[in-house]
Amino acid sequence: MSLVDLILPRLGESIVEATILRWHKKPGDKVAMDESVLDIATDKVDSEVPSTADGIITEVLYKENDVVPVGAVIARIETNAEAAIATPASASAPASAPVVTQPAPVEHEEADVLEEVPYTPEEKEATRQASSGVRFYSPLVLNIAASEGISMSELENIAGTGQDGRVSKKDILNYLKNRKVAPAVVAPAPSQAAARPSQTEVAPMAQSQPAVPVSYSGNVEIVEMDRMRKMIAKHMIDSQNTSAHVTSFVECDVTNMVLWREKIKKDFEKREGEKLTFTPLFIEAVIKSIKKYPWLNSSVDGEKIIIKKDINIGMATAMPTGNLIVPVIKSADQLNLTGLARRVNFLANAARNNKLKPDDTADGTFTLTNVGTFGSIMGTPIINQPQVAILAVGAIKKRPVVVESEQGDSIAIRHMMYLSLSYDHRIIDGALGATFLNAVSKELENFDINRSW
């Protein structure tokens, strides 16, 4: 028999920790290779952790709702593999004369510990790596630091408990809590000594008032937010506190695009095996416009503008629970219409069936949300941090509109749609925001009805 460590796997470039939602196995249960052992959640997506060996779960090292760093040992599995050498060695250790007849040297104590806890050397190695080189900070930590006015030099001095000494969300929140409390510890001036005690006594009372239970009058139902809804609420508030939101609108005639899709959608599905929705057509127009105005595909780091060369388009997707998630089409500008349709359908189905992987929601540079799916003609979307813009497309409606031509003006029934762009006014002024929005509109209005896919 031998023990195999089950390690929390890497969950994406920017994810350094995860919360354990539910254990499917408990100590004593049999588990097969690749069988799901537990469910975990990050700040982006839920996923399963499969077993890396056949055997029996002998130990579970974390409880449900615990926050665990990536790379940590979370359970141990006893396999059927023979440990022919290890077993005699461990059995003979107590029989060695030096250990029995004299105080055990420090080296022997450390050796015993390493045999019992195989992952300890890995943690020590991680600590050594953290002490040399540049520290890594997740986007979540950087966003909190920016919103709270924490400089990079100050961030470097925060002790980290994450993998490789990284600063986790818990670390920075604890630091902020202590930083805000710290001024109250400073000794008061002699002339104000009498006044200080009463002020420090009032402060805790004021802080404790929100904890008083609130009563609700009338016929009400109280529903506790689920974990994802709480995260969405926090992300939305953080985004509003980070970016200076401005929203511009434009009306768009998409008649040619609608007629073209209606004409080819059956042949497209028959030949490609995929449904052709409007979403890949919208994304195609967004990509062409981003290439003309790359600042819309950027992020802000203090007083620096980081223009992203990769165009990774996020698509807001509704889940069966009513929550929203934003899977990302990586390198979308490298895909043709068929490739975009495949990725859109794959990610949408994975989101609706809770099959997204953490990497599927990472590294987005621009987001598209289709508020028209639910009948809205327009919306004012909130920026998906750390991006600087998000485009909302409304419902397509037939309306009588004035059509200009060389022969004169006429009234015709056209397929009309509103586009709305929310952007970060810190770096995108109204002129650039409106210009980009009109560029997307023109791409859709000038759709070539005779094009192939």
Image (tube, helix red, strand yellow):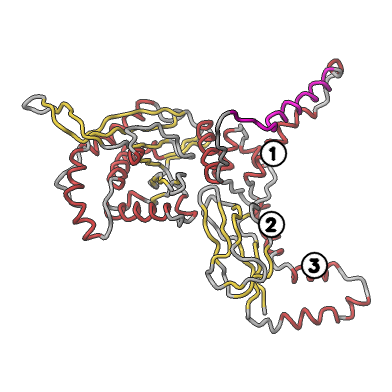
Mark 3 vs mark 1, CA separation in Å: 33 Å
The residue positioned 31% from the left and 30% from the top of the image is 435
From the viewer's side, name the closer residue of 251 and 139.
251
Q: Which mark is residue 110?
A: 3
Asked if the magenta segment contains residue 1, the reply would be: no
Q: Amino acid at mark 1?
A: Tyr
**Percent coordinates x, y for residue 310 in the rendering:** 39, 47
Which residue carries the number 2 mark? 128
Asked if the magenta segment contains residue 198, the reply would be: yes
Q: Nearer the viewer, mark 3 or mark 1?
A: 1
Q: Residue furthest right?
A: 101
Q: Residues within 10 Å of mark 1 (few under 14, many from 20)?
A: some
**Percent coordinates x, y for residue 109 in the rendering:** 83, 68
From the viewer's side, name the closer residue of 357 and 227.
227
Q: Which mark is residue 175?
A: 1
Q: Earlier in the sequence, mark 2 or mark 1?
A: 2
Q: Residues within 10 Å of mark 3 (few under 14, many from 20)?
A: few
Q: Is residue 324 found left or right of 40 in the rendered image?
A: left
The residue positioned 79% from the left and 21% from the top of the image is 199
Q: Amino acid at mark 3?
A: Glu
What's drawn in magenta, residue-wise? Answer: 195-217
Which quadrant is home to the N terminus? Answer: bottom right
Q: Nearer the viewer, mark 2 or mark 1?
A: 1
- The secondary structure type at the circle numbered 1 is helix
Q: Magenta stretch mostly in which secondary structure? A: helix
**Residue 309 seen from this side:** no
The residue positioned 54% from the left and 35% from the top of the image is 238
- The secondary structure type at the circle numbered 2 is helix
Total numbered badges shown on the rendered structure? 3
From the viewer's side, name the closer residue of 234 and 158.
234
